[in-house]
Image: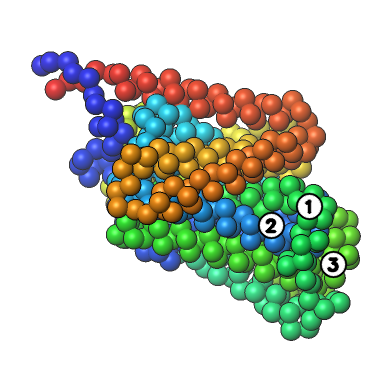
Amino acid sequence: MSETTTPAETLGSPPAGSRRKLHGNLGVASIVFMVVAAAAPLGVIGGVVPLGIAGGNGAGFPATFVVATIVLLLFSVGFTAMTPHVDEAGAFFSYVRKALGFPVGIGVALVAVVSYVAIEAGVYGLLGPAGASIVELFGGPTLPWWLFALAAFAVTTYLGYRNIALSSRVLAVLLTAEIAIVAILDFVIVVRGGDHGLSTGVVDPHAILSGSVGIGLLFAIISYVGFEATAIFRDEARTPERTIPRATYLSLILIGAFYAVTSWAMISGWGDEEAVSRATDSGSAFLGDTAQRYLGTIGADVITVLYFTSLFACILSFHNVVSRYLFALSQRDVLPASLSRPHGRHGSPHLASLWISGVVAVSVILAVVLQLDPAAQFYTWFAGATTVGIVVLLIATSVAVLAYFWTDARGHSQWRIRVAPSLGLIGLAGALVLILANLKDLVGGSSVLAWVIIGLLVGAFAIGIVIGRRVESRPTSS
């Protein structure tokens, strides 16, 4: 027996055998359903859009979704160019590890884990009250929000333990329903011509540049969190070299079009000035009020129910994503090896899934014990951490793409490996500046909390660097 140092490239790769590797046959549609569900389109329309209209650039807000989509598509050009050269399911950290080294990759991985766990836990703070409102809507008693969070948690834990195909089928049903009802609302508003004719704010430079464009773009970027998770399903995808790029582009285009069209329709439904006034005054009730006006009581009730299921779909999607992050880290011996052993029958990362459920359960219990407001505090604080973390991950991946192709274009055009990634990086860097400048407002006006969030993410990255270096230098027997 002799001692040898493990090569860095070998460290970054999963085991050659299949015992610690996930398997599946997911096509483009299945991955798109999970990614779009993670974006929680109905949740964004009901929660983020009113904030963007009220605090951002008013009637010009739909145009910010167009800008955000373009920036993320530019990012995806380089991201998908590198995909065939990253033969492992680790999403961002696999790309960063490949170009910038194993320790940096592990640092990025821990930032990703913190970001995804935060959003999964935080959304329970929206789901709980949404469930309580449904019971009250149908004449039931006022129940504590955590009862509904507990029920959703149990279902999420069960589905996360099972095969990914089951989760994808559940998400497909829920996502189809929520998109269908919003599409109907959009259609009715457009056919009726809105309150004062259809809004022209989406193409009017004066409207687009009015108010606070920065805040508008900030809320638009937040709405896409989760689209990048296409690559985490690599091992479970059918022909991933083709499936992952197609799913990435299709997810972005669908999300962007849905948000832009629906926010434009909702503004048209009230008229530019009235829409800004109502979004400011009614906030999360803006969607319900619009539905009540154009679809009647039944339509508004249906949207209330589907808002709840949209949030559940979001939680389930992020749970699947972060479970696979843990599985991938375990494959590389950063976490206990037991976490990278798939379930014998379901082929799922069942132990990694249970770990995540445990962390989320502790977070929700603490929120209840500390009597945090589920939406204004619990969700907002956690969403703030996720927003910063995900944009940082996008920036790191953009840098990794540029570095990877720096000396060898590998047959790609300059547009694909230089120009588009650079433009995307500039756009993302601008978004990060906006987010950090407004982070205090995102987390309830607390500068201390804003710095705590930044410190948490920086700490996660630093810990990952240390762990990565230790694993990289660990001697192995041969």
Report the residue at 67% width, 69% height from top: 261
Q: Which residue bears the numbered disc 3?
A: 272
Q: Which mark is residue 64?
A: 2
Q: Which one is in front, 421 or 298? A: 421
Residue 184: image x %, image y %? 67, 77
Q: CA distance from mark 3 to mark 1?
A: 13 Å
Secondary element type, mark 2:
helix
Drawn side of residue 433 relative to residue 416, left or right: right
Q: CA distance from mark 2 to mark 1?
A: 10 Å
Q: How many marks?
A: 3
Q: Are marks 3 and 1 in contact (CB under 8 Å)?
A: no
Q: Mark 2 or 1 closer to N-term?
A: 1
Report the residue at 82% width, 78% height from top: 197
* Quadrant of image for the C terminus: top left
Q: Mark 2 or 3 closer to N-term?
A: 2
Q: Which residue bears the numbered disc 1?
A: 56
